[in-house]
Amino acid sequence: MVLEGSSEALCPPPSLELRPSCNKNQPSPPLGSGSQSHDALCPEDKAPIKYGELIVLGHNGSLASGDKGRRRSRLALYKRPKSNGVKPDVIHNVSTPLVSKALSNKSQHSISYTLSRSHSVIVEYTHDPNTDMFQIGRSTESMIDFVVTDTASSGGGGQGQGGANGEGGQSAQSTISRYACRIMCERSAPYTARIYAAGFDSSKNIFLGERAAKWRTSDGLMDGLTTNGVLVMHPAGEFVSEPAPGVWREISVCGNVFALRETRSAQQRGKLVENESNMLQDGSLIDLCGATLLWRTPSGLRHTPTLKQLESLRQELNAARPQCPVGFNTLAFPSLAQRATIDKKQPWVYMNCGHVHGYHNWGFRKEKAGSSAVALTGGGGTAPATTGERECPMCRGVGPYVPLWLGCEGGLYLDAGPPTHAFCPCGHVCSEKTVQGWSQIPLPHGTHAFHAACPFCGTWLTGEQGHIKLIFQGPVD
């Protein structure tokens, strides 16, 4: 038996990229709380079916504290050995004092809509043998398959962790729901994945209180929205071939699509969008009010570089022996594992022109430094204190001067092209198509604001384009 929410249901291998391994010569110990072995879930003659992968934006390959169990920056969803999906079954209109009695059966999934102090509607759910359910939220309880916490706010830079909203540090109180949302995947081809707001708690219930936005639908059923909402944006075209942002929508508890509310937690719902659905596609973004997730399909991931390919790209960059055009010292991108400390050979770039240099102490504009010197080196790195506005010795352009970091999360790439461009102002390096695609996407911030950001660290993009083409100086010999 596989317990709901256990790591067995996700069938993750013990590797960073969460790719299944079914080699019987290397048997794996039992995973999670179940008794079924990894080999039993991944027969030698049949690879497990992957529905897709969820990637949390703002974490460049792993969480700052490290990926552990269900708390990680990236998680693959695999077909479960046995379905655990549910679907609506029976509707009960009950008086509020009877609600607790009606929900006492912990083996029965249900959603409770509190209409008034004396009236509630309870929708019972029954087992659906055709779907697998995966739950996402802040809670660490066993029914949550993917534990997601708020993306910390920072100025970007060294570690590639967190966002950049100018506040600094992690918020004291999380805005992500303990049971934020659930994804239902069809167990048969084409393995369609759909998203729904809210997840079932330890008693297999979802409660929408008296103040929550809720209503009765035209067919007599109930529907509602969660407090801070679950927002989804599907790409306007093919995410890989022609990346273009779609329109942010809100997903209801029953999976219906609505226009955004005036503010994130307003009680009045937006207008129903009848020609759109909750079906996830490659490149769909899911915002949980505190963290944004990217959905990648297996076919979409085939166009992205693996960790091994990223390492090869890094080695190719270093093999070209880029040099500082002033100091003539050879530059080198640090290893993918070294994300917190700036290396002495680290390449730096002038963000307004793209000229790549080694670190130097001249050209510093004291009158323009101020707080930007701190903001551009945040994230735990050991950058010098004087990293504000600088004058490029090659073209005399004045602007931010920051270290360059290779984007380590391959799932955020739109192709496997050479790393020739960098996001402004954080300095994360990736392919031209990737920077162009992400620079167009407005990501939710706060209750009603949107801003394009670097997907690797969450830093708000600046400048006319949000990215810069890098200009390397080759070896003089």
Image (tube, helix red, strand yellow):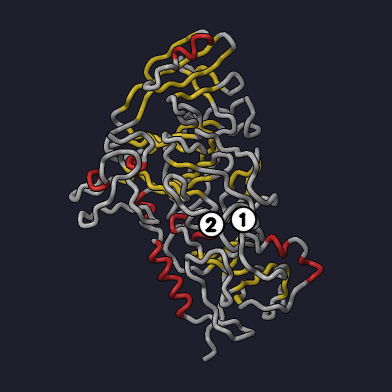
Q: Callout 2: few (<14), some (14-19), or many (20+) C-alpha neighbours within 10 Å? A: many
Residue 348 location in percent, x, y? Answer: 61, 73
Q: Left or right of 87: which side holds 435?
A: right
Q: Residue at x 23, y 55 (%)?
A: 23
Q: Callout 1: few (<14), some (14-19), or many (20+) C-alpha neighbours within 10 Å? A: many
SS for dot 2:
loop
Q: Is residue 262 visible?
A: yes
Of 100 and 403, which appears nearest the observer? 100
- Image quarter where the N terminus lies is top left
SS for dot 1:
loop
Residue type, numbered disc 2: Phe
Residue type, numbered disc 1: Thr
Q: Is residue 232 above or below residue 151?
A: above
Residue 126 location in percent, x, y? Answer: 35, 22
Residue 476 location in percent, x, y? Answer: 54, 89
Query: Which residue is label 1 attached to?
Result: 459
Which mark, by number, is residue 470?
none
Of 329 and 451, which appears nearest the observer? 329
Q: Is residue 336 above or below residue 84?
A: below
Which mark, by number, is residue 456?
2
Measured in 3D between alpha carbons, the distance from the residue under mark 1 to the one under mark 2, in whole angstroms, is 8 Å
